[in-house]
Amino acid sequence: MDDLLSEKEQIEQLRSWWSEYGGYVIGGLGLGIALLAGLNYYTNSKLDAQREASVLYESLTNHVVSGGLEAAEAVADELNTDYASTSYAPQAQLAMARLYMDKNRDQDAADALSSIIASDAAEEIKLVARARLARVLLYQNKAQEVVDLLEDQQSEAFAPAYQELLGDAYYALGRVEDAQVAYQSVMLNPLSRDAVDQQLVQWKTLDLPEASVTDDVVEEAVAPEPAAEEVVEATEAEETE
């Protein structure tokens, strides 16, 4: 009898608890289901966006290869506008920079690469964009901008390429010793074998002129001493007098 009363009491307690907290339980379950559904929708949406962006990027590369500038620009604009959160948007800018250079529109190429560096793109893509921008700037005879772009960059993988570009910029600025140091760092870096043309870097090093003496040093240089024969002749002339 006592056991029966105990079971009834437990049932009553359960009913009382459910009447008080059942709504919260149902609400929590509903919220959890809603969050799970939302997460699945978000994941599926991202996957759909990646797939759509992938199709657009493939068409863009075809336009780049064929040289269709207007068509390529249209696709790139769509990627940057509607799929900016995907990895294909900055890759599209890299492709457009190449096409712009093929079309002799170097400033448009520089602008495209600069936009990647200023964006929240993956760091690996930014490293590539920085190297390509440096090449464009060298083409534009903007050596100091190359120095400003690369001098403080720390990247083990891109160090050989960056140092070679810095060497080119230093040489263009007349900083021969800095160019030599940059080229030598490339030659001594074990990663250079797969990153740059070491033979070309060696040729650049061999072609460097000797460090020139500054004008101030030339002005302060001591005049050469007279030859011994001149001293003897001058002494004999004095004794004759």
Image: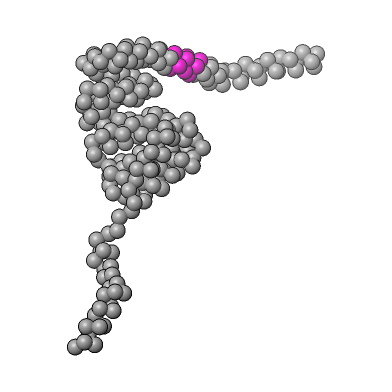
Residue 114 drawn above or below residue 58: below
Residue sitting at 23 percent across and 29 percent down? 106
Seen as rendered, the residue at the extreme left is 241
> In x, y percent, where is residue 144?
27, 45
Q: Quadrant of the C terminus?
A: bottom left
Q: Position of residue 149 (x, y in %)?
A: 33, 41
- Front residue of 220 and 69: 220
Image coords of residue 191 (percent x, y):
49, 35
Dividing the image into 4 quarters, which one contains the N terminus?
A: top right
Residue lying at 36% horizontally and 51% vertically, measured from the top left: 177
Query: Is residue 211 shown above or below 231?
Result: above
Q: Is residue 157 visible?
A: no
Instruction: Magenta stretch: give its range.
Output: 33-44
Which sits in the foreground, 71 or 240? 240
**How many callouts does the rendering have?**
0
State which quadrant residue 42 falls in. Answer: top left
Which color scheme did the rendering employ for the protein? one colour
Q: Assess whether residue 40 is covered by the magenta stretch.
A: yes
Answer yes or no: is residue 129 visible: yes
Residue 111 is a magenta residue:
no
Q: Nearer the viewer, residue 45 or 95?
A: 95
- Horizontal arrangement in the rendering, residue 84 relative to residue 33 (left or right): left
Relative side of 125 to 99, left or right: right
Asked where in the image residue 154 lies, by quadrant, the reply is top left
Residue displayed at 28% across by 44% down? 172
In the rendered image, residue 112, in percent from the top left (x then y), is placed at 27, 28
Q: At 43% from the left edge and 44% from the top edge, which residue is drawn?
A: 184
